Amino acid sequence: MSIQVLLADDHQLVRSGFRVILEMEDDIRVVGEAADGARAVEMALRLRPDVVLMDVEMPGMDGLEATRRIAAEGGPSVLILTTFDRDDYLFAALQAGASGFLLKNGTPEALTEAVRVLAAGDALLAPAVTRRVIAQFSTPRQRAPEPGVRLDELTPREHEVLVRLAGGATNAEIATALHLGETTVKTHVSRVLMKLGARDRTQAVVLAYEMGVVRPSRE
């Protein structure tokens, strides 16, 4: 079954370029295009694609607000794609509920891999972006847990899994490091997300750093 993708960008040439790249893959199909945020929200909730590729700067409702509304309605995973390598966009996108963040100057291979990762229910950040997320929370704020966040219920093994997630490890890499099966790792990740009240892996990692559960190295 093909991965269904919605493209949201106000530039026709950009949407056409993304469509060509994605539809060269046998397992990906573009099901719609939107030129502004309001249309992206409407189409995402009506078509229910697996992934929405969302630009940030669009006329009317921007991509960040569109992402927020899609997430609030339990809609599909959103991959933010932007030309602008700005921290305010990055953190606003994560807070809005985006599951991934990539720059448009990446490779076609990076784009198609990101779509597959999000369609599988995981989250993805470009390596440089991951480092900036960690740096942002390198001095833990020690905030009180949000309502519904059950930090004290994390088992030692779940804590280990969370630490590996914070380092950007995939399920396969976590399985190898902890000598577990991938199915077991997926179960642990699901339980971590549930206990943290996180929508996906990215939000779980941000929450963990923000509350000091996980501390980055000082290298």
Image (tube, rainbow, N blue to C red):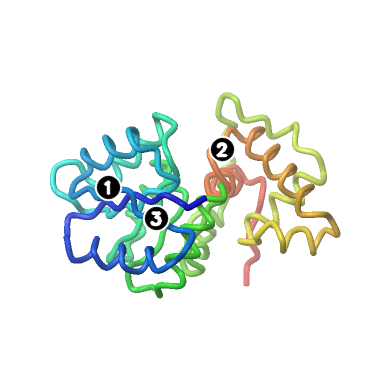
Residue in front for this viewpoint, 177 or 116: 116
**In the image, is 81 to the left or to the right of 201?**
left
For this view, does 141 lie left or right of residue 76?
A: right
State the quadrant of the C terminus. Answer: bottom right
On the image, numbered disc 2 is attached to which residue? 198
Residue 146 figure quarter: top right
Say what amino acid the circle numbered 2 marks: Ala
Q: Amino acid at mark 1?
A: Gly
In front here: 72 or 166? 72
- Residue at 27% in and 68% down: 17
Identify residue for label 3: 29
User: What residue lies at 33% left-to-right and 49% top-to-bottom?
Assistant: 31
151 in relation to 122, above or below = above
Measuring from the top left, give residue 99's x and y in whole percent: 47, 49
Q: Secondary structure at mark 3?
A: strand
Q: Nearer the viewer, mark 3 or mark 1?
A: 3
Q: Which mark is residue 128?
A: none
* Secondary structure at numbered mark 2: loop
> Residue, x 76% and y 49% (percent of image)?
183
| Image-quadrant location for residue 9 | bottom left
Return the residue nearer the eye: 122 or 94. Answer: 122
Circle nearer the N terminus (3, 2): 3
Q: Amino acid at mark 3?
A: Arg
- Return the mark for residue 63: 1
Residue 132 at x, y percent in the picture: 47, 63
Mark sitting earlier along the chain (3/1): 3
Residue 28 pos. (x, y %): 44, 58
Measured Cα–Cα span from mark 1 to mark 2: 21 Å
Mark 3 crowdedness (10 Å alpha carbons): few <14, some 14-19, many ≥20: some
Q: Disc 3 and disc 1: Cα gap in Å? A: 21 Å
